[in-house]
Every structure is written in structure tokens, then in C-alpha cells.
């Protein structure tokens, strides 16, 4: 199963160049506007937003754009129904978790409301349901309860890593002040 996951993760790297192009097109006007207005650009914030846009573009490419319209389109509301008996089916479940980990890691750096757990879980739920709904409506994917749950778990894992890292960093800097 691990080999399948590694193969699939490496396979989606082919979407990175187009994701970079899309993110650049989306962020460039903002950078130019801010520079023209104040001659100051928050480099750290801009880089984080740029990485987030690359990530979002890649997710859209993986889950929607790369799939043929009309190729899929059903609803599966059975929890753990996709786990199956093969390594491939189990890999898909794990990959849904992996796919949302960056979401939980990066989003709190962009909008401070997501430094809190509950708003983060709500946005993970909303985003996943939206993605599954668009897949269903465009028939580019199945609407699966498992995908929603696994995406939320991935987002929570990413958020927990973000929160823990920030907690450790803040403790280290607080100790240096004493």
C-alpha cells in the first residue's frame, strides 16, 4: 500500500507547473496593486499566500480538471465503504487524508480565525462538501462520505501540526524573555 501511495503522490507532481502558473496569474495583480499603493509588500505573507494558491490549484487539477466530465457520478454515504479489501482502495482513503494536511497547515497562517480549532474544522467540512458536490454535479467524481471524513481528518492533522509548532515556538521565545 505504501508503494501505491508514494507512486500516486509522485504522479500528481505533474500538476505543479500548471499550478504555479495559475497561482502566479492570480497573485500578480495583488502584488502589483499593493506595491503601487504603498510601495511595501509583506514578503512572508505573500509567499505563504502564493504557496496556498499553488496548493489549491493543484487540488482542483487533481480532483476536477484532470478528470473527464461525465466519467463518474454517484453518491456513497457508507462510512468506510471505500476502505475495501485491496491495497489500492486503502491507498485512496489514506491519500484523501494526505491531500488535506497542507490545507490545515497553511490556512491558519493566512487567516487568523483559523488559528482556532472549531472554525478550522468547519472550513475543512465546508470545503470538502463543496468539492464533493462539484465532483458530483460535473460527474468528475463520486460524492463519498469517506472522502469528506478523511479530508477533515487530514485538515485536522495539518492544523494540529501547525498549532503544536506555534505552541513550541511561542514557549521557546517566552523562555528567552525571562
Image: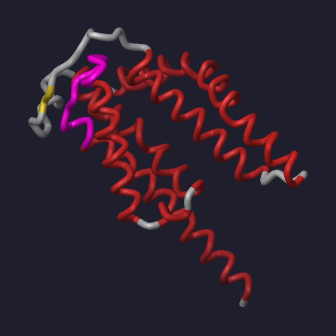
- Identified at 69% across, 37% down, the residue is 27
Q: Is residue 173 magenta?
A: no
Give the residue at the far bottom of this rendering: 178
Q: Is residue 53 above or below residue 137?
A: below
Q: Nearer the viewer, residue 150 or 120?
A: 120
Between 38 and 42, the residue placed more toward the observer is 38
Percent coordinates x, y for residue 13 in the rendering: 54, 21
In-image side of 114 versus 42 (left or right) = left
Residue 141 at x, y percent in the picture: 28, 21
Magenta residues span: 136-148
Q: Looking at the picture, does residue 47 appear above or below residue 1?
A: below
**Position of the N terminus by quadrant:** top left
Q: Residue at x 73, y 82 (%)?
A: 176
Q: Position of residue 161 (x, y in %)?
A: 48, 57
Q: Nearer the viewer, residue 62 or 38?
A: 38
State the count of labels.
Answer: 0
Asked where in the image residue 23 lies, by quadrant, the reply is top right
| Figure check: 176 above or below 147 | below
Residue located 41% across and 36% down the image: 99
Is 144 included in the stretch rendered in magenta? yes
The foreground one among 78 and 90 is 78
Amino acid at each position: 500500500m505504501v508503494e501505491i501511495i508514494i507512486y500516486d503522490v509522485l504522479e500528481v507532481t505533474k500538476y505543479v507547473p500548471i499550478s504555479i502558473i495559475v497561482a502566479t496569474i492570480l497573485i500578480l495583480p495583488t502584488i502589483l496593486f499593493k506595491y503601487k499603493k504603498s510601495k511595501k509588500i509583506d514578503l512572508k505573507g505573500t509567499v505563504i499566500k502564493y504557496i496556498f494558491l499553488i496548493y489549491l490549484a493543484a487540488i482542483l487539477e487533481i480532483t476536477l480538471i484532470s478528470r473527464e466530465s461525465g466519467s463518474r457520478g454517484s453518491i456513497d454515504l457508507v462510512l468506510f465503504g471505500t476502505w475495501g479489501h485491496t491495497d489500492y482502495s486503502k491507498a485512496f482513503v489514506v491519500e484523501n487524508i494526505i491531500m488535506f494536511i497542507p490545507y490545515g497547515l497553511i490556512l491558519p497562517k493566512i487567516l487568523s480565525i483559523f488559528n482556532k480549532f472549531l472554525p478550522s474544522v468547519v472550513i475543512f467540512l465546508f470545503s470538502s462538501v463543496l468539492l464533493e458536490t462539484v465532483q458530483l454535479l460535473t460527474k468528475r467524481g463520486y460524492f463519498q462520505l469517506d472522502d469528506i471524513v478523511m479530508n477533515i481528518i487530514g485538515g485536522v492533522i495539518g492544523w494540529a501540526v501547525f498549532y503544536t509548532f506555534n505552541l513550541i515556538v511561542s514557549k521557546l521565545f517566552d523562555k528567552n524573555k525571562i
